[in-house]
Amino acid sequence: MNPLPQFPVGFQVGVSTAAYQIEGAVDEDGRGRSIWDTFSHTPGRTRDGDTGDVACDHYHRWAEDLDLIAHLGADAYRFSIAWPRVQPDGDGTLNIKGIDFYDRLVDGLLERGVEALPTLYHWDLPQALEDRGGWLARDTAARFADYAALVAGRLGDRVRRWITLNEPVVHLAQGYAFGVHAPGHTHLLAALPVAHHQLLGHGLAVRALRAAGAGEVMITNNLTPVVPAGDDEADHAAAAVYDAFHNRLFLDPILTAAYPPGLDAGVRDGDLEIIGTPLDGLGVNYYFPTRVAAPAPDDPLPFRMVEVEGVPTTAFGWPVVPDGLHDVLTGLRDRYGPALPPIWVTESGCSTHDEVEPGGRIRDEARIAYLDGHLRALHRAIAAGVDVRGYFVWSLLDNFEWAEGYAQRFGLVRVDYDTQRRTPKDSYTWLRAALADRP
Ligand code: IFM
């Protein structure tokens, strides 16, 4: 494989994880219950009934995992803080034992020369807040800002940059519209206030974090280039609607202080000003493009997703289209112009069918090709003038892939869930060599 192109000085390469997907220890040190505990313990909700009860046991094995990150040569580690671990019921004072865990984690990263980049919310809402309406309730936004302030008060002397929310569109769609993620609601279009309340929570949290001395704040969105399935006007119109729901819904209010038409459910006077509080960066998670056709007459939604044809797919069946990352990045620049802050690709990766050879080696060539292709696409976007400052691989470890349980393996490092043994795959070795090769 050819060496990777040279990235600008200071370009960060890191790895990403999320609390519920790796930590386990769900009943330890005063952690409260989250909506994912409830959901995964409800029969029929996850593949094989898998739960995050143990996951990668990272709560106990964090030092070993940080050693893996340091040995890789990563510049930064994006992890998430479990809200119910530090504020068990979603309000009130900090659970000291819970926040101590993240305190150790941050110190451990800094000792190893790795930047700590925490995400405050990666879908694990305290169940107590869901019982009061979850993100359908406006008050959850205020609770989120209080939680952000408490965490920054404790970690802000060592954490310079923060991410508020992870992929609010996925949380809205999968969790509240279609019910395939926690909390499992099937409200379809009636779920829309969840978008506004998450965004309001984000805006309030940005202000709370800055008041607590945060250096830089960003949000991470899942973005996809939307491709009309055909040439006719109806397909193009449906693609524009999908683009508004998936991409613009969580960007326009932040960057232009306006919602796409018709998507402003629950907005009150003054909200857009809070949501539009300027950011220092935008996190972009890219996995695949979306092909959209006009809906059939009895479809409940104003668009229909159709297969992207003629490209390789991951173990999950997701289309592999590195150019889509280039298109997302240049598309953001074209759409938002000077309002667009610097970008960090905060997730990019794939699940693979890994086989462990008798000697223990895992030749995950498909992941190497995936990462190589996406890094080259990102480099082309930089060459085209887009200000992209970093790339984070999803994920450091194989982990709990939500409704798919442990069936999809996204890690640079394999986890044997029977023994919790970690084995770096060939992709880890490849990335390590690429990082060591930087000037
Ligand atoms: O595992 C998820 C992650 O939690 C959010 N972004 C997409 C990943 C792969 O599905």
Image (spheres, rainbow, N blue to C red):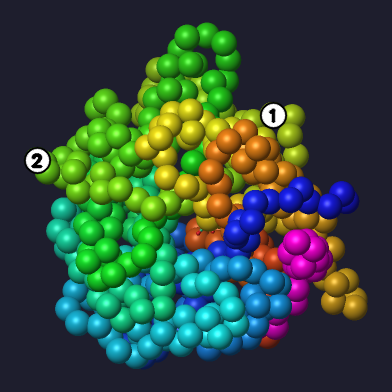
* 270 with respect to 275 (left or right): left
Where residue 325 sits, quadrant-wise, is: top right
Q: Residues in magenta?
A: 420-439
* Residue linked to disc 1: 309
Secondary element at image label 2: loop
Marks 1,2: beta carbons within 8 A: no
Residue found 22% across the figure and 51% down from its top? 200
Q: Nearer the viewer, residue 9 or 397?
A: 9
Identify the residue at image location x=55%, y=33%: 330
326 to 361, vertically: above or below: above
Task: Tell whether position 240 is magenta.
Answer: no
Secondary structure found at label 1: loop
Is the residue marked by circle 1 packed among few (<14), some (14-19), or many (20+) residues within 10 Å? Answer: few
Q: Residue 164 at x, y = what percent? A: 35, 59
- Image position, residue 82 (x, y; %): 38, 73
Task: Give the vertical position of 186 relative to 431 (above or below).
Answer: above
Q: Nearer the viewer, mark 1 or mark 2?
A: 2
Asked whether 432 falls inside the magenta stretch, the response is yes
Q: Is mark 1 within 8 Å of ligand 1?
A: no
Would residue 230 be found to the left or right of residue 122 on screen?
right
Residue, disc 2:
269
Which amino acid type corresponds to the residue marked 1 in the rendered image? Glu
Of 188 and 244, the residue lying toward us: 244
> Could you tell me which residue is drawn at 38 percent across and 88 percent down?
100
The residue shown at (20%, 48%) is 274
- Residue 280 percent location from the top left of the image: 39, 53
**Which numbered disc flags the more N-terminal residue, 1 or 2?**
2
Q: Quadrant of residue 206?
A: bottom left
Q: Residue furthest left?
A: 269
Which amino acid, by three-letter code, is at mark 2?
Asp
